[in-house]
Amino acid sequence: MWVKIADYTPGATIAVEHTCDGSNIPPVIQWGGAPPGTQAYVLRMYDPDAPVDTFIHWIAYNLKTTQVSPQILPASQGYNDFGKVGYAGPCPPPRDPPHRYFVEVFALRKPVSVSGAVTWDRLWSAMADKVIGRTETFVVYKRQRR
């Protein structure tokens, strides 16, 4: 499997428009090469460099397409760690060094059944035994001091 964030090479700096310092719109994310039998995908964007634990910026599940973008937003999205449903772009503390933002895509043998407030922990519990493929890439971002 493979995943690509817009026109970024792995480790590139993400544009401000995709962050809390800009328009906070999700980048185009595409993936492919899923194993035979894939019936759904799960997407997760997270920051492993957050001051306290891994910070979730976006989760989407039961995806049937191989692309998300500002024009093609997933119907099933969960809570990010800002406490809102949907995408929340990179927003590291201004004094921190650059943070990495990983995008993971999981291929599932069947869609997940999850209801209520969908958090990463609840989603992972519902999907862990259905994962048949996984891929990831990352970008970086450092906020400018104002």
Image (tube, rainbow, N blue to C red):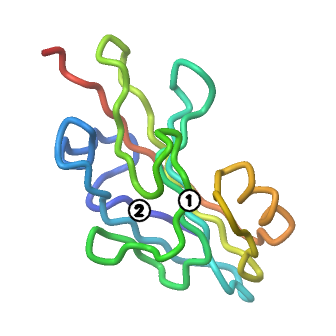
Q: Position of residue 97 (x, y in %)?
A: 36, 16
Q: Looking at the image, which residue sits at the far front?
A: 116
- Place residue 136 in its image quadrant: bottom right
- In the drawing, what numbered circle is on residue 3? none
Amino acid at the residue labelled 1: Gly
Give the labeled residue for mark 1.
78
User: The C terminus is located in which quarter?
Assistant: top left
**Residue occupying image coordinates x 51% and y 25%:** 50
Give the labeled residue for mark 2.
4
**Residue occupying image coordinates x 37% and y 26%:** 92
In the visual, does 39 lie left or right of 94? Answer: right
Q: Is residue 22 above or below residue 76?
A: above
At mark 1, the secondary structure is loop
Q: Position of residue 21 (x, y in %)?
A: 20, 35
In the visual, does 69 lie left or right of 55? Answer: left
Amino acid at the residue labelled 2: Lys
At mark 2, the secondary structure is strand
- Which of 113/54 is in front? 113
**Residue occupying image coordinates x 56% and y 59%:** 78
Q: Is residue 128 above or below residue 100?
A: below
Q: Position of residue 128 (x, y in %)?
A: 81, 61
